[in-house]
Amino acid sequence: MARSVNKAILVGNLGRDAETKFTPGGAAVTRFAVATSRRWKDQTSGEWKEETDWTNVTLWRQENLATYLTKGKQIYVEGRIHTRSYEDKDGKKVYATEVVADEVILLGGNAGGGGDRGGGGDEYAQSSRPVSMPRSAQQRSSAPPAQQDDYPQGITDDDVPF
C-alpha cells in the first residue's frame, strides 16, 4: 500500500473567540476559525487583489486554551484535514471540512481587532509556559526546571546567532 500524508499548517488570525464545549464523556472540544489571506497582482489590470479563506479548526482535550484564543490573535495551527457529515434539522446530509489540530501556538499580537479586550493579550505574555505542545512532547516525562538566570525563557548565549 502506498503511503499518504494528511497535514495542514495554517498561520493566520482568529476570526472570533474560541469556544470550548464538552462531550458526554467529558472530553473538551475547542473550536475556532482562522483567516488566512493571499495577495496577488492581476495580470490584466495590474491591480493588487486579496483573498481571505476561513478555515474551521477543532482542538481536542485542551480546555484551558480557549481563554487565550481571542479574536484577532495571530496563531500557528498544525494538524490534519478531516471531513465529517451529519444531518441537519431538515434531515439533509451536510458535510463539514475542518482542520483537527495537533498543535496550536500563539504567535504575535492582535492583527486588526480584538485589542481592546481587557489586557490585550498580556496574560499570555506574562506566562512562561507554552500555550500548546505537540502531542508527542506531552507524552514524555517532564524535564527538571531550568535554572533561573538572567534568561527567563531558557535562552543562553549559545542561542544567539552572532
Image (cartoon, rainbow, N blue to C red):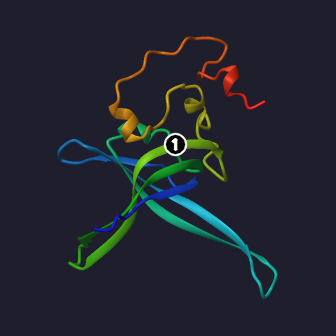
Q: Tell me the kind of residue under disc 1.
A: Ile
* Image spot of residue 59 (x, y percent): 37, 49
* Image spot of residue 124 (x, y percent): 55, 32
- Count of numbered marks: 1
Residue plotted at (66% across, 51% down): 111
Q: Quadrant of the N terminus?
A: bottom left
Q: Dot 1 corresponds to which residue?
A: 105
Residue plotted at (33% across, 33% down): 139
Residue at disc 1, secondary structure: strand
Is 64 in front, or is 79?
79
Is 125 in front, or is 161?
161
Q: Taking 60 as reference, is 144 above or below it?
A: above
The extreme right residue here reads 46
The extreme left residue here reads 25
Q: Is residue 104 left or right of residue 30?
A: right
Q: Taking 140 as reference, is 33 above or below it?
A: below
* Image spot of residue 140 (x, y percent): 35, 29
Name which quarter of the figure residue 128 lies in.
top right
Residue plotted at (32% across, 42% down): 61
* Image spot of residue 97 (x, y percent): 38, 68
Q: Residues within 10 Å of mark 1 (few under 14, many from 20)?
A: some
Q: Quadrant of the C terminus?
A: top right
Q: Is residue 27 left or right of residue 65?
A: left
The extreme front residue here reads 1
Q: Is residue 107 left or right of residue 102?
A: right
Q: Taking 131 as reference, is 56 above or below it?
A: below
Q: Taking 102 as reference, is 159 above or below it?
A: above
